[in-house]
Amino acid sequence: MQVDFGGFASASSARLHSSAFQLCRDWHLAQDLTQTTLAKLFLSWERAVDSDNLTAYAQKVLLRVYLDHRRRRSSTEAVPGVLREPSYSVSPELRMTLLDALARLPGRDRAIVMLRYFADHSVEEVAQELGVPITVVKSQTRRSLIKLRHMLSGERPTLFA
């Protein structure tokens, strides 16, 4: 069955945008990342549509677009003072607290946590998407979760306890 790009883009753009926001924490940058991802998908649509899981393929492209943006970002780029996020029906205070803690993790660690727990990818899928060994994903996930737990509880992290 051949999927058309317009239908896929309409069906998946909201989820891609949400994933992009969770990675970068900037609503407008998330829009740009989503558009860049869709443009890249459009340009390689014949290859993309042949993948086993088109949604996972799109998430992988989004992750690469985000990581490319992080690598190229100027050190003089201004950080926005106020982040705007859509309203959520389940505990928005808890969600914002968690997003603040996630923002304090290094970029690759945040990407690993987001892919594992927000995008529900397996360890193997995350390793493949980031181009790192499975052991790196496992150890960084463990360390990142310890850091998050301590950031949220206000305690000092002990990584090797």
Image (cartoon, rainbow, N blue to C red):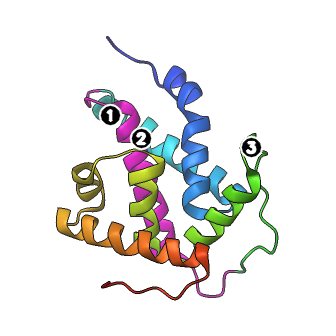
Residue at the spot x=51%, y=72% of the render? 148
Q: Is residue 73 magenta?
A: yes
Residue for badge 2: 58
In the image, which is nearer the foreground, mark 3 or mark 2? 3
Q: Quadrant of the C terminus?
A: bottom left
Q: Is residue 51 visible to the viewer in this orientation of the structure?
A: yes
Label 1 or label 2, whichever comes before in sequence order:
1
Q: Is residue 161 above or below residue 21?
A: below
Residue 107 or residue 43, whichever sits in front: 107
Q: Is residue 19 above or below residue 82?
A: above
Residue 34 location, x and y as percent? 57, 47
Residue 15 or residue 47, whichever sits in front: 15
| Amino acid type, label 2 | Ala
Residue 100 location, x and y as percent? 65, 69
Name the dominant secondary structure of the magenta segment.
Answer: helix
Label 1 or label 3, whichever comes before in sequence order:
1
Residue 88 location, x and y as percent? 74, 43
Residue at the spot x=34%, y=46% of the render? 121
Label 3 secondary element? loop
Q: Which residues fall within the magenta stretch? A: 50-77
Residue for badge 1: 48
The dot on residue 88 is 3
